[in-house]
Amino acid sequence: MLKDITIGQYFPGTSVIHRLDPRMKIVLTIVYVVLLFLVENLAGFVLSVVFVLAAYLIARIPVKMIAKSIKPILPILLFTMLLNLFFVRGTVIWQWGVLEITREGVRLSVLMVIRILCLIAGTSLLTYTTSPMTLTDGIERLLKPLGKVHFPVHELAMMMTIALRFIPTLVEETEKIMAAQKARGADMETGSLIHRAKALVPILIPLFLSAFRRAEELALAMECRCYHGGKGRTRMKQMHLAPRDLWALLLTAAALAAVIVCNIFFGSLYG
């Protein structure tokens, strides 16, 4: 399960999406999230799914990566689906005691799952196609106006990027610790829920110690390189908007407009 966590991973490539300006990719991701929350009918959901699948194909990222990124959150998806399935009132199609399933509940649960899947796939594409350092520069440049009111823009961008960068590292460290504990006879897969929770203690303590040690080593390395924040910092790669960025923005805006048109002409499935 842990090896299926792909958050924060970067897959180098030369596709059009890889070569987009990081600032534009962040903006496009935000627009796509807004698009998903505006969808109210089947046509809009189909458009959202086709849009994100086309983006993965253009970026040459295997579509199976969507499944890998979704696998760790399957319990959350199942819980969300059950809540909508059993607690939405409407036309009853099945009932057993106090439990009942309605036509509206089935429809809402399916649409909610699709929305969450598209949300994860769309946001994951940002880190799949953008290196951590480039992502840091993009976030910092977008938030630069907030520096006028003494907002720590550079520090915030650096913290976000370091957190994303260390997710795969911590996952790998957790797998090593679990393998070492199992080799010593630890049983983490059988027994009651309380027993399994207690079995995680020998994993969490070394993991926290390793994380603190890595944080200290990173701080020492940054200090040795005379890092003093973003003031006066120069960049080897300068960011410039290209025609492909404008085309990507137009296509995403067109998809957003299409969703709004679908809401007007086809109505809402939630009513």
Image: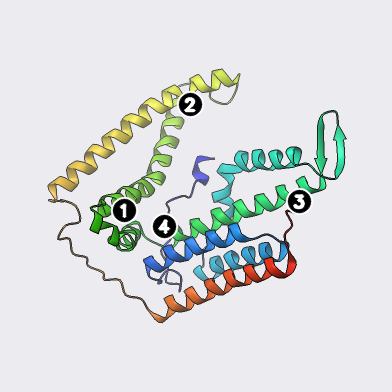
In the rendered image, residue 138, in percent from the top left (x then y), is placed at 34, 62
Q: How far apart are marks 3 and 1 (CA)?
A: 39 Å
Labels 3 and 4 touching (C-beta < 8 A): no
Q: Residue 10 carries which label?
A: 4
Q: Residue 182 carries which label?
A: 2
Kindly identify which residue carries mark 3: 107
Labels 3 and 1 touching (C-beta < 8 A): no
> For the residue marked with disc 2, what is the amino acid?
Lys
Assign the N terminus to one quadrant of the image.
top right
In the rendered image, residue 111, in percent from the top left (x then y), is placed at 69, 53
> For the residue marked with disc 3, what is the amino acid?
Arg
Q: Residue 157 carries which label?
A: 1
Which one is earlier in the sequence, the residue at label 2 or at label 1? 1
Q: Is mark 2 on a helix, strand or loop?
A: helix
Q: Is mark 4 on a helix, strand or loop?
A: loop
Q: Nearer the viewer, residue 2 or 271?
A: 271
